[in-house]
Amino acid sequence: MAGLHRRLQRTLHGDGRSLVVAYDHGLGGANYAGMADPARTLPTLVAAGADAVLTTVGIVRRFEKVLHECGVIVSFDRVAGDPEPAVREAVLLGADMGKIICYPWSTAEPDSVERVRTWAAVCHAWELPLMIETIPVSFEASEAHTPEKIGQAARIGCEIGADVVKMHYTGSTDSFRPVCAALYVPAVVLGGAPGESDKAALEEVRGAIDAGASGVAIGRRIWTHDRPDRMVAAIGEVVHGGATAEQAMRELRSVA
């Protein structure tokens, strides 16, 4: 599957790690902060060092020239029914990867694992890598987001065909290390809602990388920031440059 491996490499930096900017929130109606003007925001995110952008078919169609400079991951989260037309569209648009959410143990979506397994099969038939975002039960069910369940959900993602798993961070390097050790595909950590300090967010990225994560897929913590380009650069210093959170804060404060 030479095409699949070539596309996968397009989403990675030369060190095998990946800084993915999640920019698909328009699917939920987000039209504020850095989502309000993609023509202004996207070029700065790519220029600042995003290895890939996770986004929508609408964004890919409109901003193809901007996204040509980085990897492109297309979200399939709001697609219903037969996966094949959506996968074919993504391939024809030049996407390097697809992405879909899986909710193990969900009572609201009891067929989630089986449905995502079908998506993986169709993606691979088109030689399109698939990122599976594994969320125990649901985003709202925080009581299920324990290190054990986060790890089990990510392993399920591996087993049903993920080429990359997108997952929660467990809160500490020590608790996340055994989770990563049990995975046999690259894992990227999701960002979640903003709220904590910039330094705390960068410390979380540092902890995840130290535990064995291959990168991050962060959205709102970047595009709601006053300087989303500097936030990308700071995260890049941690993911690719080996910087501590304190060192990365200096990048964030830079006026370059």
Image: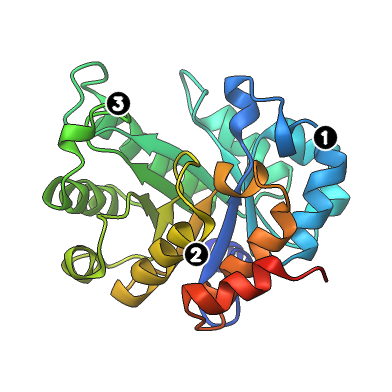
| Nearest-to-viewer mark from 2 and 1 | 1
Q: Nearer the viewer, residue 82 or 222?
A: 222
Q: Distance between the residues labelled 3 and 2?
A: 37 Å
Q: How far apart are marks 3 and 1 (CA)?
A: 29 Å
Apparent side of residue 86 relative to residue 193 in the rendered image (left or right): right
Q: Is residue 140 above or below residue 168?
A: above
> Label 2: which residue?
1
Q: Distance between the residues labelled 2 and 1?
A: 37 Å
Q: Nearer the viewer, residue 194 or 110?
A: 194
- Determine the residue positioned at 23% across, 37% down: 136
Q: Residue 2 carries which label?
A: none
Residue 30 picture location, percent across and down:
64, 25
Apparent side of residue 241 relative to residue 176 in the rendered image (left or right): right
Residue 94 picture location, percent across and down:
72, 50
Contact, CB < 8 Å: mark 3 with mark 2?
Answer: no
Q: In which quarter of the image is the C terminus?
A: bottom right
Q: Residue 140 carries which label?
A: 3
- Determine the residue positioned at 69% across, 67% down: 253
Under circle 1, the secondary element is: loop
Q: Earlier in the sequence, mark 3 or mark 1?
A: 1
Under circle 2, the secondary element is: loop
Q: What is the three-letter code of the residue carrying label 3?
A: Glu
Q: What is the three-letter code of the residue carrying label 2?
A: Met
Q: Can residue 8 be seen in this view?
A: no
> Label 1: which residue?
37
